[in-house]
Image (cartoon, rainbow, N blue to C red):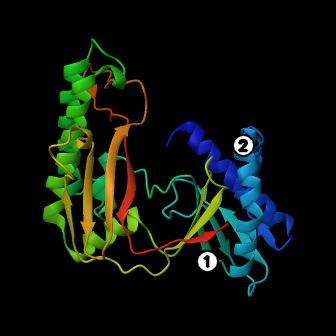
Amino acid sequence: MSAASNDNGRALEYIIVDCLLKTTLFSPTSATLEDQKRDIGKYYSLNNELKNDFNICTPKIVKWILGKLQSHNTLKIDRLKDNDAHVADIQFRDTNEKIILNLSIKNNHAALKHPRPYSTVQACGFKIKSPQDVFFRKQMQIISEQYRNKVFPEFTEYSETGQNLVCLYDQVCDHHINWLNPQSNPKVASNLFTFIVNTNFYQIKVNPTKKIPVFIEVSDFRNIALPQSFKAYKPTPSNPDHKNHFRVEFDNNWEVDFRIHSAASVIKKNSKLKNGKEKFVQLDLKFDVSAINKTVSPIIIK
């Protein structure tokens, strides 16, 4: 996700929470108040068209939320951090800290997750520095160093490295497929699916468009059956445009696409230690994970 897209998403969260707080029905956490102060400028910096879309959608979203919470009183409202375990952006809890409602807020995209490829083993439920993790990261390090050796010192930015970058993406995807498939069992399938898709939340997606009036999609992720197995594969190996993609097909009728890309412009070098040796530094890589097939169907709020 680009910095501008991230700021727009936070601006949308800001205006929704601001309108909810004006109802005086909710008590914000201290972290929520800090996030509101941080993001007020992002909202007022929006271009007029997008701000108008958000202003049209927000009362409709708030009305829908109030309808879901009408049987509850004195709820806390909390804006969760991006690095929290749950995909929710806004959470409502009662006075006993019981979670009443989780909301994932999306602005014009439906990406499920943006994980880093080096930590895939943790997404499958293995601990960091476990034998599985050590092996996986070592192979990622080998792939990363091969890329660096090909492009340094002539090139310093990912966009300059052409076919070498395509090869890097292809190798990372192949490594994931080769490692994931032998791990297919109920525990790993459940852990990976829960990490990527998560459950127990509603997704609210605002869809600005120039062709038709802005509309809202609400999807219910609360009761998705967890998978027992999966298969990782390349979508169309003969298509060069898919060398930075791989997919995972779960046995609960979900299929997700992993698209890898650079998350920075400059290629980081390894750090130098005092003894003259090099310490490995991860490349700035990130997956955009989206659903190809899923078992939830959105309702449209116009």
Give the residue type at disc 1. Answer: Ile
Give the residue type at disc 2. Answer: Glu
Which image quadrant is residue 103 in? bottom right
| Residue drawn at 20 percent across, 59 percent down | 232
Q: Are marks 1 and 2 in contact (CB under 8 Å)?
A: no
Sequence order check: which comes first, mark 1 or mark 2?
A: 2
Q: Is residue 151 above or below residue 185?
A: above
Per the image, the residue denoted by label 1 is 99
Q: Is residue 37 above or below residue 250?
A: above
Camera-side residue of 249 and 149: 249
| Quadrant for the C terminus in the image | bottom right
| Residue drawn at 71 percent across, 51 percent down | 53
Would you say 283 lies left or right of 15 here? left
The answer to whether residue 86 is seen in the rendering is yes
> Residue 219 appears at what percent x and percent y?
53, 71
> Residue 111 appears at what percent x and percent y?
46, 55
Camera-side residue of 199 and 300: 300
| Residue drawn at 44 percent across, 68 percent down | 198
Q: Element at badge 2?
A: helix
Per the image, the residue denoted by label 2 is 49
**Mark pair 1, 2: CA separation:** 35 Å
